[in-house]
Amino acid sequence: MGIEVIFKGKNLLRLLEGLGAAMKISLISVIISIVLGIVLGMLMASKRPMINLILRIYLEIVRIMPQMVLLFIVFFGFTKLTGLNLSAETAALIVFSFWGSAEMADLVRGCLISIPPIQYESSQALGLSRIQTYIYVIIPQIVRRLLPLSINLITRMIKTTSLVMMIGIVEVLKVGQQIIEANRKSAPNAAFGVFAVIFLLYFLVCWPISCLSKYLEKKWAN
Amino acid sequence: MSLEVIENYLPMFGDAFLLTVKIGWIGIVLAFVLGIGCAFALYYKVPFLSFIVKCYIELFRNTPLLVQLFFIYYGLPAVGIRISVQVCGILGLGLLGGSYMAESIRSGLDAVPLIQTESALSLGMTKWQIFRLIIWPQAFGMSVPGLVANVIFLLKETSVFSAISLMDLMFTAKDLIGLHYNTTESLFLLVLFYILMLLPVSFAGSYIEKKARFGMFGE
């Protein structure tokens, strides 16, 4: 079935390294997205018409454009436009952070506006300062709502980073293709085994994270 | 940006657009049918089948479409299963979408309180009547926002088809950039056609969401 190719030489190690390359990109863009997303989400929840309009347009662009199209625009368009050479990794980081921040911002905004204004008023009536209101009343609730959703976003970002292969980054799929190419003679049906293993690898990375998200959601329901 | 180039490219992008839309929507219909089937199997706890459905949903929700397509298109022929590239695209999108649709519909079904089923039973309704008149209208109304989001997500995912050399919008753009180096024009048309494909769906989606909201019992 072509599975044996995986255990030949350093093939499994190479596949894992490829997975690591993809994970590195997703991890960095996840961190950028979470930080930027929280700031943008807070801006969106505050009522400033001009900023709101700009952010709405930004959100709509991200909602409609496939990540792959964004990737192409940044990777090919930017180079053409400025003449600067943008490495594929940088392009990927820009695109996934751009996309992830919008998604995160939307989640943060949703959580912020779901807190009824009466809670702010009640806190004030109880004599809590602004900072105390946030620390003791608002933020604990937001964290409970936001955490499962943002963990879910992380799995989506990990899945989406597999696209970087299309702009020439050597990640797990590319390594898989190389292994299949190299063993064309000795194992003609290696493609099945290699791609099945990659399928499984992605599943093993994402599944525990989505289980965690589901668990937290259930634990903090209502 | 030159208009002449855009004019020359337009027919090619037009063909690719039609192909992408065709495969995308067939895939979505397949996903919807599959999703309904799986959601029912889970909701009615069909023995054995619901276990398989659970495995399927977890497996396809936690892997990228690109990897799924590579497995179907390059992996399966190695063990003797050959599928044409278009069928492969439809199958990949349908399987991915089915797992997402199933989750949306199931959460809608679960949101209808059990007491309504019990009340309907005590009123002497049959199982089919309960489903048709009580559960489904409410469950469907509640799953519509999720379903709309899934449709947009799946239409966006069609851009991945280019990886298995399906002549879709993405592939055409990439091909033309490689051939003539008219990057700006190709990217402009690419964006234009994706807006054409997704903006109407996005608007229709928010309209349908508003229309499909059923008042829950007791609201």
Image (tube, coloured by chain):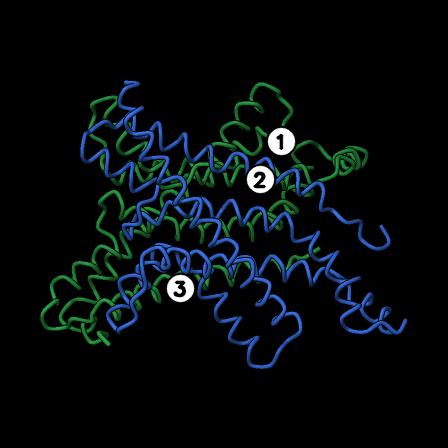
Q: Chain of mark 2?
A: A
Q: What amino acid is at disc 1?
A: Ala
According to the picture, the residue beneath numbered tag 1 turns out to be A45
Q: Are marks 2 and 1 in contact (CB under 8 Å)?
A: yes
According to the picture, the residue beneath numbered tag 2 turns out to be A108
Q: What amino acid is at disc 3?
A: Phe
Q: Secondary structure at mark 1?
A: helix
- Left or right: where A46 falls relative to B163: right
Q: Secondary structure at mark 3?
A: helix
Q: Is residue B154 above or below residue B113?
A: above
The answer to which quarter of the image holds residue A20 is bottom left
Q: Chain of mark 3?
A: A
Q: Chain of mark 1?
A: A
Q: Split into 4 quadrants, where in the image is the N terminus of chain B?
A: top left
Judging by colour alone, the chain drawn in blue in this rendered image is B
Q: Is there any visible trace of residue B1 in the rendered image?
A: no
**Residue at (47% x, 33% y) in the render:** B196
- Left or right: where A73 falls relative to A63: left
According to the picture, the residue beneath numbered tag 3 turns out to be A203
- Left or right: where A136 falls relative to B72: right
